[in-house]
Structure formats: C-alpha cells, structure tokens
Image (cartoon, rainbow, N blue to C red):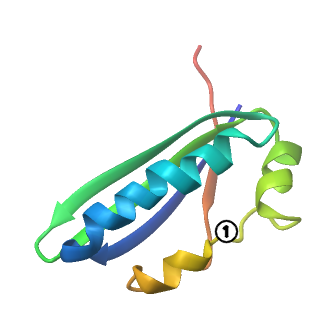
Amino acid sequence: MISRIWHGATPAAKSDEYLNLMRTVAIPDYRSTPGNKGAYALRRMEGDTAHFLMLTFWESEESIRAFAGDDISVAKYYDFDKDFLLELEPCSTHYEMYDK
C-alpha cells in the first residue's frame, strides 16, 4: 500500500469553510477512485494559519494515477482551492507502507 500526503495552508479565519469543502468534496472524490483505501483530512492551527494534510491510502501507483494524473508527484487541486490556500504547493509526497 502507498500513502499520499498533501499539505496546504489557509488563513485561520477561512479554515472551517475549507475543512467543510474537504469533507464534502475532496474526501468523497478520493474515496470514489478505484484503488483508494482511505482518505482523511487533518487540520492544525498555528496562530493565524491553519495547516491541512490530506492523508490518503492507495493500493498502487496505478490507482494514484487514476486520481492525480500521470505524474503522481504533482499535487491535484480543486477549483475552490485558489480562493482559500495561501499558496498552491506543487507536489504531494508518497510513502510505501509496511505493517510488519
């Protein structure tokens, strides 16, 4: 299994609205992609900034490509992201997962 991690940050004042969009748009989109094994939004407040991580789990790089496109290192953004995020970070990171 492969974990994919994306980071973004919003102004704290917009974080509740952004979290709602992650829960109602992004997470269902991730979870509807064949090969997705889970999707979670994490939020951490740091002063006037809210940091978000999208932590998703995938059965293969091929399943990630179905979601993110041919270059799986490139971050995927939604139309609403530009109205919330302080910057559009270019990449997501991937880790192979092991349990034993």
At label 1, the amino acid type is: Lys
Where does residue 27 sit, x and y in percent of width and height? 56, 47
| Horizontal arrangement in the rendering, residue 99 relative to residue 10 (left or right) | right
**Res 75 quadrant in image:** bottom right
| Horizontal arrangement in the rendering, residue 33 relative to residue 47 (left or right) | right
Query: Which residue sits furthest left?
Result: 47
Taking the image as drawn, is residue 54 in sight?
Answer: no
Q: Please report the residue visible at 46 percent of the width from the left and 65 percent of the height from the top.
A: 7
Where does residue 44 sit, x and y in percent of width and height? 24, 56
Front-lying residue, 35 or 1: 35
Query: Which residue sits furthest top?
Result: 100
| Horizontal arrangement in the rendering, residue 12 relative to residue 89 (left or right) | left
Q: Please report the residue visible at 66 percent of the width from the left and 39 percent of the height from the top.
A: 31
Quadrant where the C terminus sits is top right
Taking the image as drawn, is residue 65 in sight?
Answer: yes
Q: Residues within 10 Å of mark 1 (few under 14, many from 20)?
A: some
Quadrant where the N terminus sits is top right
| Horizontal arrangement in the rendering, residue 50 relative to residue 67 (left or right) | left
Where does residue 13 sit, x and y in percent of width and height? 19, 75
**Res 65 quadrant in image:** bottom right
Q: Please report the residue visible at 14 percent of the width from the left and 77 percent of the height from the top.
A: 48
Q: Which residue is mark 1?
A: 76
Where does residue 33 sit, x and y in percent of width and height? 77, 43
Q: Please report the residue visible at 58 percent of the width from the left and 43 percent of the height from the top.
A: 56
Examine the rendered structure and indicate whether residue 50 appears above or below residue 99. below
Identify the secondary structure beneath mark 1: loop
